[in-house]
Amino acid sequence: MDAVAATVEGLALAEWLRYSRWGYATVNTVHVFGIALLVGAVVPLDLRLLGFWRSVELGPLYRVLSRAAATGLAVAIASGLLLFAVRATEYAALDLFLVKIALVGAGLALAASLHFGADLPRLAPARQRVVGAISLLLWPAVLVCGRLIAFVEV
């Protein structure tokens, strides 16, 4: 893993981002935007699954918010890969980073199981509450882990 991380750090794009004031700042801003879009879509959907706003029909809400969340996730992953490349060896050695990646994987697995498997609006209310609770724990945990990475050292 160290060799792969070192190779990634040595890429021309990673070098440019490491020394480019506005390049890194731009990618970091795009990453924050992606996270905001993801969490901003997931939280209201999860709260609806937990029983809030029962007067709001779940089907249309799910269609809109799941697409917004997917877009935010795609933006966050793409920009996150660029940010990772800048300090790949450091990040790869951080337990907190590995926890974040595992949580993202769990969130992706949950989302994929709903998108490609179970039809969320047709799930029993009890199962909807379970899905909402798990998601409401996972994605903010990803957010917290990601934010804390800036404050820990290898």
Image: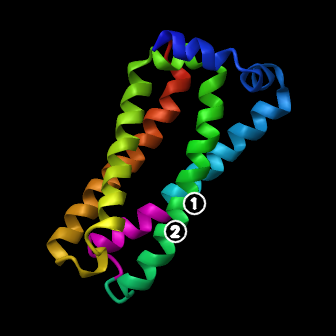
Residue drawn 57% across the image and 56% down it: 72
Residue drawn 21% across the image and 76% down it: 123
Residue 45 lies in magenta, yes or no?
yes
Tag 1: residue type? Thr
Q: Position of residue 27 (x, y in %)?
A: 72, 39
Which stretch is magenta?
A: 41-53
Disc 2 target residue: 67
Residue drawn 26% across the image and 59% down it: 133
Q: Based on the displayed image, in which of its 4 quarters is residue 126 positioned?
A: bottom left
Q: Position of residue 76 (x, y in %)?
A: 58, 46
Evaluate if marks 2 and 1 touch, with contact meaning CB atoms under 8 Å apart.
yes
Disc 1 target residue: 71
For residue 33, above or below residue 49: above
Q: Residue 100 — which label? A: none
**Callout 2: SS:** helix
Report the predominant secondary structure element of the magenta stretch.
Answer: helix
